[in-house]
Image (tube, rainbow, N blue to C red):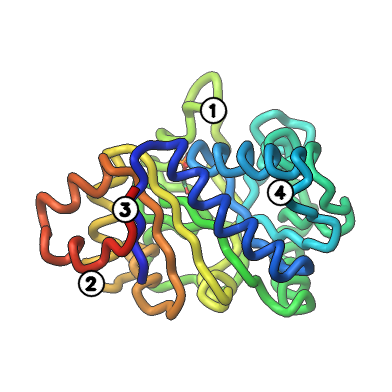
Amino acid sequence: MKIISASDYGSMSRKAANIISAQVILFPDSVLGLATGATPSGIYRQLIDWYQKGDIDFSKTHTVNLDEYCGLPSDNRQSYHYYMHSNFFDQVNIPEENINIPNGIAGDIDSECGRYDKLIAELGGIDLQILGIGNTGHIGFNEPDESFDKTTHCVKLKEKTIEANSKFFESPDQVPKYAITVGIKAIMQAKKLLLVANGSEKAEILYRSLFGPITPSIPASILQLHPDVTVIATEDVLVQIRKNKPDAIFERVLRRD
Ligand code: PGA
């Protein structure tokens, strides 16, 4: 595992965007696993900027988003369909037919989950998966549980997640209680994982995920078993982690600003 320190949010976003653009330039037909939330939006802004300058071409790229709220139609401003289109897809040249996001308003959620796993398999799996980390330790919307949920499934969101995500809604009551999320298997089968974390409130959960026991009660802890993980965290996150475990983090910070 490589842990890269970024001086601030802009630097974190640029470093992550660099890894994604290298992937797309080297392998234009890559399958990118994409994430939503506050953390990755700077990455998308940077990629749009490089696209507009002619540095990246997404015309052969496929995308598979991690998750979507249940019950929100794609034109709802809080849906992840809306987020992805307004923050990224509408401003780059990924063909519409190459874009995949779970359908949160499918009549039959179970068959929608099955469809999604099948399409990821048909694409040959994910080449580079972008991940944020939730305060519960979730990746995608894989919330703490008694076992790791392998396949795409419908999940009841934890109160902590609803509270954290209420920043995007007018009130916590409006945050959907359920979501469809890609499971741990598709994430762990991705060839490369890129996790981004910004802000000291992520320090404790990131520390427990990267250095604590591997347990489904902290879903992100499974990343310790993946052979190719890059974590890019802002310095305020890493400073907090170093306070608890200077030896562990020092060994693993491979690049600094
Ligand atoms: P955030 O969400 O980027 O809005 O903090 C991260 C996540 O829940 O995965």
- Relative to 190, is 39 above or below? above
Residue 201 placed where, x, y %? 28, 39
Q: Which of disc 4 and disc 1 is earlier in sequence?
A: 4
Q: Is residue 96 left or right of residue 71?
A: right
Question: Which part of the image, by quadrant, shows the N terminus?
Answer: bottom left
**Residue at the (72%, 55%) spot, across then down:** 102
**3 or 4: tag closer to the N-terminus:** 4
The image shows residue 74, relative to residue 19, as above or below, that is: above
Q: Earlier in the sequence, mark 1 or mark 2?
A: 1
Kindly identify which residue carries mark 4. 104
Quadrant of the image occupied by residue 252: bottom left
Instruction: Report crowding for label 1: few under 14, some 14 to 19, many 20 or more residues within 10 A (C-alpha).
Output: some
Q: Where residue 123 sits in the image (x, y, percent)? A: 77, 74
Between 35 and 172, which is closer to the camera in this rendering? 35
- What distance separates the C-alpha of mark 1 from that of mark 2? 32 Å
* Distance between mark 1 and mark 4 Cα atoms: 18 Å
Q: Are marks 2 and 3 in contact (CB under 8 Å)?
A: no
- Can you tell me whether the CB of the residue at mark 1 lies under 8 Å from the nearest atom of ligand 1? yes
Q: In the rendered structure, which amino acid carries the disc numbered 3?
A: Arg
